[in-house]
Image: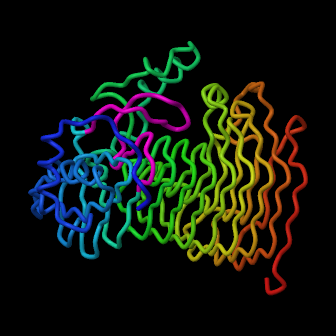
């Protein structure tokens, strides 16, 4: 890996102890730190990461099933889940520390994501093994609408409460994202299979230089979006497969007042060679786009089953506002969708009264669309305040 960044001073004796435990070649097997299949390996994984941070390298999960609490990655640490390995996460909210996060486009302090990195450089999750969030209707999925906490967070935003005071202690708060690098540079998530997520699956927030390649997401729970770049730039999503309970890929940039406060767009995102078998939208932009989205370029997408509602879904409203522009989608094959191949709306879940932040959606180009089975090809729902501008679509000659 690239040279590691400087870290905070450490106790010299502790550093020597960790280095003595570590195997050579900068591969740190969690079993060398006490992990055993079928047991809670949280402490062993944390020790392996601590040792790996000193040199840079890989924390390796070998074949077998291991149980863990949330994992905190550090700079220059790659979590590698080997073939035949399953890393299964605890489902007790009490095991999840409170960290800074962004939940549905609003900043707060709540349950840690299952795999979390903050303000780090060169972090990765790789390997052909499985990450199992353990979510089901018996735990995380049973609380699909934490209304009292959600309303409290919304009120905090309207009252101008600083982010550092928007703290949701254990027993409150929200279902965590599965993998969330937050404010990181050079992020790589590659090849892993991810199942049973509590909430959004891969959720980079405020990150740059992100590569998501070859992952398989199979998670059908509530709000189980597959991959949500959130106010990120220079992102590549390639060769991935999605079966989700919500949108498959959803580009976002913050919600309403809080998204406008942060004011950080998602930009320069490339998506190619991905497959989608279930979800509301294969490629979605929105609805949390108050910080703007521009320069998203997708090609070679294949909707392979009948469990997807839309191949392309762009959605915002007068509360979200924001600009969505310079979007190109090329060479999309739709075996079947349940509703329409393309949906673009500037009044998604529009409030009863105009929200005062008319969104702008423009410069949308779709080329070489092939739809074998779709009740409708294109749906556009706009308003006089927010008309869709400069929209172009061409279909394949073989359609």
Q: Is residue 146 above or below residue 220?
A: above
Q: Quadrant of the C terminus?
A: bottom right
| Residue at screen point 44% across, 59% down | 2
Q: Is residue 150 magenta?
A: no
For the point 36% across and 25% down, which residue is it?
168
Q: In the image as oriented, which residue stretches furthest toward the top?
A: 159
Q: Which residue lies most toward the bottom here?
A: 398
Between 363 and 279, the one lying in front of the other is 363
Q: Position of residue 1 (x, y in %)?
A: 41, 62
Q: Is residue 131 above or below residue 287?
A: below
The spot of residue 187 in percent (x, y) is 48, 55
Q: Is residue 90 left or right of residue 229?
A: left
Residue 3 at x, y percent in the picture: 42, 55
Magenta region, mostly helix, strand or loop?
A: strand
- Location of residue 155 with respect to 290 vertically, above or below: above
Residue closer to the observer: 252 or 56: 56
Say whether residue 345 is left or right of residue 61: right
**Colour scheme of the rendered structure:** rainbow
Magenta stretch in the rendered image = 96-123
Task: Using residue 104 as the reference point, say whether residue 265 is left or right of it.
Answer: right
Q: Which residue is painted at 71% across and 52% down in the image?
A: 314
Q: Is residue 107 magenta?
A: yes
| Residue 75 % position (x, y) | 38, 48
Counting every numbered tag in the picture gives 0
Is 98 on the left or on the right of 304, as rendered?
A: left
């Amino acid at each position: 890996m690239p040279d590691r960044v400087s870290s905070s001073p450490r106790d010299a004796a502790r550093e020597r102890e960790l280095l003595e435990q570590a195997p050579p070649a900068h591969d740190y097997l969690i079993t060398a730190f006490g992990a055993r299949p079928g047991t809670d390996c949280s402490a062993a994984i944390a020790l392996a990461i601590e040792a790996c941070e000193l040199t840079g390298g890989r924390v390796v999960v070998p074949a077998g099933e291991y149980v863990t609490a949330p994992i905190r990655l550090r700079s220059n640490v790659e979590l590698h889940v080997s073939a035949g390995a399953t890393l299964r996460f605890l489902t007790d909210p009490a095991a999840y520390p409170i960290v800074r996060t962004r939940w549905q486009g609003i900043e707060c302090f709540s349950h840690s994501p299952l795999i979390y990195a903050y303000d780090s450089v060169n972090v990765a999750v790789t390997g052909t093994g499985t990450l199992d969030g353990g979510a089901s209707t018996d735990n995380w999925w049973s609380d699909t609408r934490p209304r009292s906490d959600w309303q409290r967070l919304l009120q905090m935003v309207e009252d101008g409460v600083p982010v550092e005071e928007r703290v949701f202690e254990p027993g409150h708060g929200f279902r965590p994202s599965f993998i969330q690098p937050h404010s990181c540079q050079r992020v790589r998530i590659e090849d892993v299979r991810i199942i049973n997520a509590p909430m959004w699956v891969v959720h980079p927030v405020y990150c740059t230089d992100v590569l998501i390649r070859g992952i398989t997401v199979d998670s059908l729970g509530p709000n189980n979006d597959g991959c949500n770049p959130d106010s990120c730039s220079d992102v590549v999503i390639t060769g991935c497969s999605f079966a989700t309970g919500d949108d498959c890929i959803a580009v976002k940039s913050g919600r309403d007042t809080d998204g406008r406060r942060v004011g950080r767009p998602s930009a320069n995102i490339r998506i190619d060679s991905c497959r989608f078998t279930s979800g509301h939208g294969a490629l979605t932009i929105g609805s949390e786009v108050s910080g703007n989205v521009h320069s998203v370029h997708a090609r070679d997408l294949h909707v392979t089953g009948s469990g997807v509602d839309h191949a392309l879904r762009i959605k915002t409203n007068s509360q979200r506002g924001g600009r969505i522009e310079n979007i190109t989608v090329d060479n999309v094959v739709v075996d079947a969708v349940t509703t329409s191949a393309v949906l673009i709306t500037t009044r998604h879940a529009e409030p009863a009264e105009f929200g005062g932040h008319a969104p702008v959606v423009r410069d949308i180009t779709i080329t070489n669309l092939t739809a074998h089975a779709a009740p409708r090809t294109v749906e556009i729902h706009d308003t006089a305040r927010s008309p869709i501008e400069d929209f172009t679509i061409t279909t394949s000659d073989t359609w």
